[in-house]
Amino acid sequence: MLLIPCPWCGARDEKEFENGGPARVPRPDPTAMTDEAWVDYLLIRPSHPGALRERWWHVHGCGQWFELWRDTVTHDFLDAPDER
Ligand SMILES: [Zn+2]
């Protein structure tokens, strides 16, 4: 079980959250790229071992979105959550 530190509610079970994917990924202009590149942007998320800043939604709790740094190998959260 993964405990996710919500900045408003404290550490809660991962079942209460939805992962919003990597945070702060620049949104490209869809009119300046091919359809294939746009689909790749929408559906393919970067995946690499190590620290990754992610967006989280406490959907079954306070309903807030926030960002966390998580080690994708150990699943440890690396800092205090940022409100977003
Ligand atoms: Zn919360």
Image (cartoon, rainbow, N blue to C red):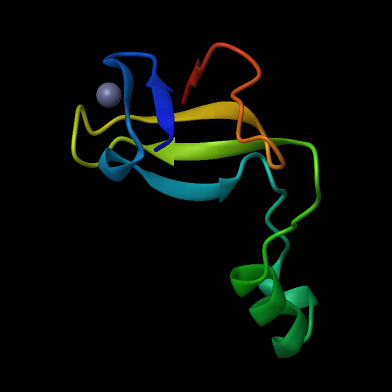
Q: Position of residue 20 (x, y in %)?
A: 48, 49
> In this orientation, which residue lies closer to the viewer: 29 or 9?
9
Residue at the outermost front position: 1
- Vertical relation: 19 (above or below) 31: above
Q: Position of residue 71 (x, y in %)?
A: 70, 33
**In this rendering, position of residue 62 left or right of residue 8:** left
**In this rendering, position of residue 76 left or right of residue 2:** right
Residue plotted at (78% across, 86% down): 34
Q: Quadrant of ligand 1?
A: top left
- Vertical relation: 25 (above or below) 42: above
Residue plotted at (30% across, 13% down): 8
Residue plotted at (70% across, 88% down): 35
Q: Position of residue 27 (x, y in %)?
A: 68, 55
> In this orientation, which residue lies closer to the viewer: 68 or 65?
68
- Vertical relation: 61 (above or below) 35: above
Quarter of the image with the N terminus in it: top left
Q: Quadrant of residue 73?
A: top right
Residue plotted at (73% across, 88% down): 36
- Vertical relation: 39 (above or below) 45: below
Count of labels in the image: 0
> In this orientation, which residue lies closer to the viewer: 77 or 33?
77
Q: Position of residue 41 (x, y in %)?
A: 69, 69
